Amino acid sequence: MDIVLVTYNSEKWINNCLISLDREWNIGEKLNVYIVDNHSSDKTIEKLQDYQPQYFGKYIIKEENSNLGFGKANNVGAALGNDEIICFINIDTEILENTFTELQKEIILSEKNIGAWEMRQLPYEHPKIYNPVTRETSWMSGAAFAVRRTVFEQIKGFDENIFMYAEDVDLSWRIRANGYLIRYCPNVSLYHYSYAKKNEVKPVQYIESIKNNLFLRYRFGTIKQILQGYYEFWKVLFLNRSPFPGAKTKLLKGFLEHWKKVPYFRKTKEKNRTIAQFYGWDYEKTRIGSFYRYTELKDKPLVSVIVRTCGRPSVLRETLLSLRNQVYDNIEIIVVEDGKPTAENMIKTQFGDLNIRYVATEEKKGRSFAGNIGMTLASGKYLNFLDDDDVFYADHVETLVAALEKDGNMAAYSLGFETPIEIKSTDPYEFEIKAYNSRYQQSFDKVKLCHHNYIPIQCIMFSKELFTELGGLDTSLDYLEDWDLWVRYMQKTDFSCIMKTTSEYRVPFNKEFQNNRQEKLDQALEVVRKKHEQYIIKIAVSDLVKYGEDNLWQILKEKFKFNR
């Protein structure tokens, strides 16, 4: 495998990066390391030359007489090797002991149409969304990825007219425009020390990212998207607050300079207009929690994921695939089918590698009954529901276990995307996601949880002790059964809240289905509110005061029917 590194005044990162690479001899082949230095003025070259590799196959340092930029320097490094896989990583990274072992597994098991593989960055995972089932992603970060040499050469590598930032998006979109897919690999991790502090704004990144976004709109976008880019630019220049001193002056200078390259990007316009996505200055929808800090777990207690299903194995299959993708490796899956065992054969033939226990009720007993069977059979310290039409992102279980082990509460929840879907086919299961809605972003509040449910069922993980002591789902309820359970459980414990999106839950896009679902929810609401009259919850006076302050205007508006 060829490893390409680019340095520029990088002396403080060199030792940790190279030492971490040098211990990866155990993958069965030696790594060839090619380093291109962009005319550093510190001790970068000296440190590179002083390093004595133990296990590298090749160790070549290429010194440039000027700063070529990130993309062009990577092209120079790639041309020095000839291995069929090129791995590009930033110099401010540190490889973990199993990084390349896991990467090789991914490459070997990948279909031929997978052109590139993106690694997971720690301690801050890149927040853009990916498909939790297939792990397909629309673009990959240039900080850590691998690509087939044939693919890289076919598209002529990085565009050397993009000096820095967004060159990875451009590369990714050209890979996809040539018919290849990009796969996100959450089990292939490395530390990337990209930010010194949370929400840090880097001046060069800020200016170049905006300028290059405009270039990509010319190459991949429509006229409307190009005009939208300039509209966003003028908003930044005249309406937004300056993120650092002199930002707007530098931005205006960059804007004037960008016209020189506009003809080039217009000339190299991509014909396939379905590849690009522009969300302001982003290129993909993002998950909340971009600065959630990864915590390495010392202990990994067993987690039982309870999956309720009912006669739709093709739907269930997606859910189980998302569980196979979990980075947390001590999971027990309890699948409870409400009715006949229609999913049994699919589970046996396709998911024999997973720790799954499957049971079917034979007769229809209802969702709550099925959930209680799952909790009863569960052996884990922690339990988490995942209904058969919902999915976890790869870090869901890991994130919630980390919170529970750290905070000492008996329940913890993260955030989930509400994704309205239009079903095209039930078998095979095909659908279109119409939106990614972050509907609930509520930190734990007992008063508000008494008023309404803001924790979707798959978002929360809880100790089995709560089930043992306080019981399970109310079998008379088929809707809002989860809300009733959370209200009972908060009699015993506070809930930890992690402001990070780690799951998706499907809802119908079809208006008729929506109305039918809402009617059932409204009916259940009356029953649950009546039931809650019997509950006694200990709530601090300060919590009531806060709730009153937060909701005073809403209460007045509802009571007296007036607006501001």
Image (cartoon, rainbow, N blue to C red):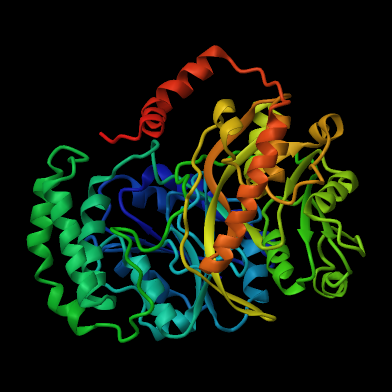
305 is higher (above) or lower (below) than 298: below
| Residue 463, quarter of picture | top right
Q: How many marks?
A: 0
Residue 98 % position (x, y): 66, 55
Residue 349 % position (x, y): 85, 75
Position of 545 with respect to 283 (left or right) is right
- Determine the residue positioned at 50% across, 67% down: 137
In depth, the one of 136 and 489 nearer the eye is 489
| Quarter containing the C terminus | top left
In depth, the one of 6 and 351 nearer the eye is 351
| Residue 30, quarter of picture | bottom right
245 is higher (above) or lower (below) than 546: below
Residue 334 % position (x, y): 83, 55
20 is higher (above) or lower (below) than 214: above
- Determine the residue positioned at 59% across, 40% down: 453
In depth, the one of 458 and 95 nearer the eye is 458
- Determine the residue positioned at 79% across, 32% down: 466
Residue 275 % position (x, y): 38, 77
Position of 261 with respect to 341 (left or right) is left
| Residue 412, quarter of picture | top right
- Determine the residue positioned at 33% across, 61% down: 279
Residue 455 in view (yes/no):
yes
494 is higher (above) or lower (below) than 51: above
In depth, the one of 91 and 313 nearer the eye is 313
Position of 259 with respect to 213 (left or right) is left
